[in-house]
Image (cartoon, rainbow, N blue to C red):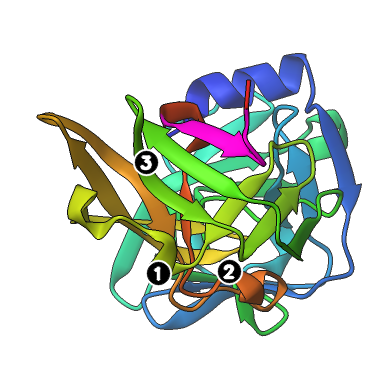
Amino acid sequence: MADLEALGKKLTTEGPHKIEGTPRRIRGLLGGKYVFDTTSAKYVWEHAYYPYFYIPKTAFEKGVLEEVGSSAKKPYWLGKLSAGGKITDRVLVFDHAGPLEDLVRIEVSALDGWFVEDEKLLGTHPKDPYKRVECIPSSREIRIEVDGTVIAKSSQNVFLFETMLRPRYYLATTSMNWEFLTESETTSYCPYKGMANYYNVKIKGKEIRDVVWYYRYPTAESALTAGRLCFYNEKVDVFVDGVKEK
């Protein structure tokens, strides 16, 4: 979680990395009630990697947003949201702060749900409007090894290309050497792909935890990956048509 006091100071002195408007309808759910509903949200990049939604103060339902403590002589203040018997203090409010004036930042996980139009936001941040996910079937052979032992080999794959990230290779379940895989209880959420489940790899007394993931029910844009398994390239040896990845 971000240190909200430090973040407020940084953003009001240095400014955000980038900010722009969006026509998307953005709603936030807390305690069974929508605490805001707006088509005037802003994408704010606090850093270069991905944006957050910042919400206009005027979009909040009456009485749900309150100040916490004193903000004397500061262009921002810490706040809290209350609705339906639930409260969160993971709220940062900007007053006279240049491009962030009258905007509110809420920790994504602090709400019961965020909705972009009628789609629920997955993960810890919204989709970046400048990034794209592309899934393409490929017959190039992918071989996965750990310490020289083949864990998987497949020529019926889906390659996933995501802007600014390395390719990921999604392999058929029948291409696995299942004797080396054990199920993990870990789950994670990606705004572009959905909820992921994981496997560990155990070989020669060595265990690499959560090195394999898959999506049972991926988002529409990643539908071709459904049920396929993907390895962290960084934790195993990956060979593409016999050539080892660097």
- Which of pointers 2 and 1 indicates the residue nearer the eye? 1
Quadrant in which the C terminus is drawn: top right
Q: Give the alpha-carbon distance from disc 2 to disc 1, as whole Å.
A: 14 Å
| Residue under pointer 1 | 174
In percent of width and height, residue 217 lies at: 49, 78
Would you place residue 76 above or below residue 196 in this image? above
Would you place residue 223 above or below residue 63 in this image? below
In percent of width and height, residue 214 lies at: 43, 62
Q: Please indicate, yes or no, whether residue 62 appears anywhere in the rendered image.
A: no
Neighbours of disc 1 within 10 Å: few (<14), some (14-19), many (20+)? few
Q: Which residue: 50% across, 24% down?
A: 5
| Residue under pointer 3 | 150
SS at badge 1: helix
Q: Main secondary structure of the magenta part?
A: strand
Q: Which residues are magenta?
A: 236-244
Q: Is residue 189 magenta?
A: no
> What's under tag 3, amino acid-wise?
Val
Which is nearer the eye, 176 or 93? 176
In percent of width and height, residue 241 lies at: 67, 41
Q: Please indicate, yes or no, whether residue 100 appears anywhere in the rendered image.
A: yes
Which is nearer the eye, 235 or 190? 235
Q: Which residue: 74% across, 48% down?
A: 162
